[in-house]
Amino acid sequence: MERKIIIYDTLSRKKREFVPIVPGMVGLYVCGPTVYGDPHLGHARPAVTFDVLVRLFRFLGYKVRYVRNITDVGHLEHDADAGEDKIEKKARLEQLEPMEVAQYYENRFHEAMRMLNTLPPSIEPHASGHIIEQIALARKILDNGFAYVSNGSVYFDVRKYNEKYHYGILSGRNLDDMINNSRTLAGQEDKHSPVDFALWKKASAEHIMRWPSPWSDGFPGWHAECSAMSEKYLGKEFDIHGGGMDLVFPHHECELAQNTASRNTGGVHYWMHNNMITINGQKMGKSLGNFITLDELFHGTNKVLSQAYSPMTIRFFILEAHYRSTLDFGNDALQAAEKGMKKISVAAGDAESLSAEGGPGADETEKSLEAVKTGVMDALCDDLNTPVALAGMFDAVKIINNVKEGRAFLNSKSAEILSFLFHDVLSDILGIVPEGNAGGSENGSKRLEGLVSMVLRERKEAKDKKDWAKSDSIRDDLNSLGINIKDTKDGTEWNLK
Ligand code: ZN
């Protein structure tokens, strides 16, 4: 732990050296998914970003308690105070129990996260399992005078809070501007001010998901769960709170206000936010028709894509950009990432098998590799600079290729550094698992190739007969064996996950 880790903190708007509250320990809270839809690209980026952060801390010897919640109470994405609960809507349409819908999408989310090779959190609390804590939070804020009860609902009194503290400090907003720019929406007449937000909401008659409270049968406001659950599992103050930049306002701003109003401290020492993704330069959105789920990405079944991309290619692609830059998804960029992923996979296989008996210039090669190693680790510890770290990895790939072609030679120290780079850094910290047939025995991979082509011929016959059920089930069976297939205009390609 002698290594300094630098983190960009959204609240102080600068890079700061990470100093843990308890030496050697990291408390990390990341806002997890709202489980009312299939996991999509927007889920992949924070998941991969904070996964690398956790892996890096653990690699450096920290004990990390990684808490990521599941929002299963069901809230509208950007307006928790009005409108229909999305889980309930889906449940009604499909005649399902609301928790059946939430569980289904939670399972889908976990499966996608597993495919992206993200480590599971240490604790994954559900909003629906922490209603008591959320009621206690609302009660505390009421007792402290920063909330009011109105018609069975409890609202956070933003103006009152702003007299003592600063509402807008995280997102850089000013309360007067917010009040001037907001409209009073229908169904929000209970609020004293349009900027107030719900801590507890009285349920309307048709609302299925409801719990008793001192104020009404209802449900907690969206922001309440993260304040309540982060305090429960990480304490009144904890190290890092993460999430996507779209959560800075209102979600994290409200969380910060709730923390301060209930426990007189913002509670979070570093706020980390990953930037957004775009699709061919455009914001991703259902209404824009460019919404891509992870399943569509892994199977190439979205019209924006010309082919399927493996989960590792997606992970690699996400890490090619710094987490605080926007990341633009498009076919060309993904194809380039696929090529990069192949190169690094082949090099990872070579790194293990190259001879390390030395030769002309071996000391120079060792020096170059040492510099790559230092550069890669420095980059990762400098606010998770994964693109610079990956560029360093490709410098190592070049050296490996020179060795393969007899233009450079490795000594035993160089072999150790290569093993550090392609095992410890690539797999353990970046979580990138080399793909393809690299490493398999020649005979074994030939047999596998024969077997897969046989199965693919079977699938083609089924497709020709328009037996989609059979062709899909063959695809899924191969997939569950770790064999990804993708249909291109030249036929079906496959690779190992
Ligand atoms: Zn949250």
Image (cartoon, helix red, strand yellow):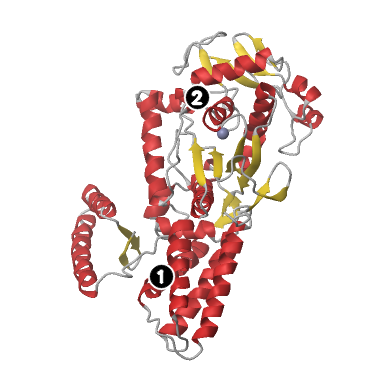
Query: For this rendering, which residue is in front, 292 or 259?
Result: 259
Residue 493: image location, x then y, percent: 32, 65
| Of the pair 113 and 360, the residue shown nearer to us | 360
Q: Looking at the image, is 108 positioned above or below residue 383? A: above
Q: Is residue 35 above or below residue 488?
A: above
- Callout 1–callout 2 Cβ contact below 8 Å: no
Residue drawn 75% across and 35% down? 169
Q: Nearer the viewer, mark 1 or mark 2?
A: 1
Left or right? Give the position of 265 relative to 228: right
Can residue 336 be spotted in the picture?
A: yes
Q: Marks 1 and 2, Cα distance to the nearest angstrom?
A: 48 Å
Inspect the image, locate mark 2, and give the three-letter code of the amino acid beneath it: Asp
Is residue 142 toward the left or the right of residue 394 in the image?
right
Name the image quarter holding residue 88: top left
Q: Secondary structure at mark 2?
A: loop
Q: Which residue is mark 2?
A: 85
Q: Quadrant of the N terminus?
A: bottom right
